[in-house]
Amino acid sequence: MELKSTENWTSPMIKRIAHIGVVVRNLKLSETLFTKLLGKTANHTGFVEQQMAHLSFYPIGESSIELIESTRPAESGSSMAKFIEKRGEGIHHICLEVDDIRSEMIRLKGLGFQFVEDRPSPGGVGCIVAFIHPKSANGVLIELSQRV
Ligand code: ZN
């Protein structure tokens, strides 16, 4: 099969993979594991109220690995807790950094992508985020993030 250039389809507004989100059951244990694996400690840790989750970021080049531990049980409706109950620990989402999240949402909606929520909301560290529903992206939850 010959792969055709898709240059015309690339968006100048998508800049890089900001991070890959990994859900874990126990953040402390996972921090120990990833500190060993990567040979460095997390450069940022914190609690995001919007997501009711504790996060740890490990920078790797231009990107990071984000470890996420939900503080809510699955019965509370937490999508992260439900995810871990159904699929176990593992890769949860890919975050793409964009210049202008609102115009990128308009562009992607125009191409048929569905968003979990219609508007961007506050994300982790000085950014606003929006999630593309996995059912419109081959089962992959995609987070768009814009620095503010
Ligand atoms: Zn994320």
Image (cartoon, grey):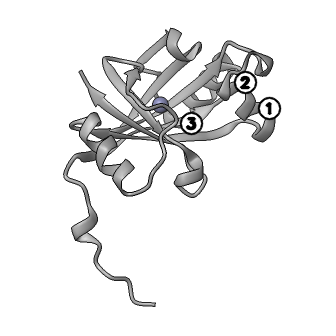
Against 142, is 53 above or below?
above
**Horizontal and vertical percent for residue 2?**
39, 89
Q: Secondary structure at mark 3?
A: helix
**Which callout, 3 or 1, points to the residue nearer the camera?**
1
Residue tagged 2: 25
**Horizontal and vertical percent for residue 54?**
57, 14
Q: Is residue 83 visible?
A: yes
Q: Name which residue type carries label 3.
A: Leu
Q: Earlier in the sequence, mark 2 or mark 1?
A: 2
Left or right: 6, with 2 as reference point: left
Mark number displayed over residue 37: 3
Q: Name which residue type carries label 1.
A: Glu
Circle 1 packing at 10 Å, graded few (<14), some (14-19), many (20+), is few
Q: Name which residue type carries label 2.
A: Arg
Indicate if the residue with disc 3 has its beta carbon within 8 Å of ligand 1. Answer: no
Residue that appears at 64% across and 20% down:
69
Q: Quadrant of residue 105?
A: top left
Residue that appears at 28% across and 78% down:
5
Gap in Å between the C-alphas at discs 3 and 2? 18 Å
Q: Secondary structure at mark 2?
A: loop
Q: Is residue 61 visible?
A: no
> Is the residue under label 1 in contact with that under label 2 (CB below 8 Å)?
no
Gap in Å between the C-alphas at discs 2 and 1? 10 Å
Residue tagged 1: 85
Q: Secondary structure at mark 1?
A: helix
Q: Earlier in the sequence, mark 3 or mark 2?
A: 2
Against 35, is 125 above or below?
above
Q: Quadrant of residue 19?
A: top left
Q: Earlier in the sequence, mark 3 or mark 1?
A: 3
**Which callout, 2 or 1, points to the residue nearer the camera?**
1
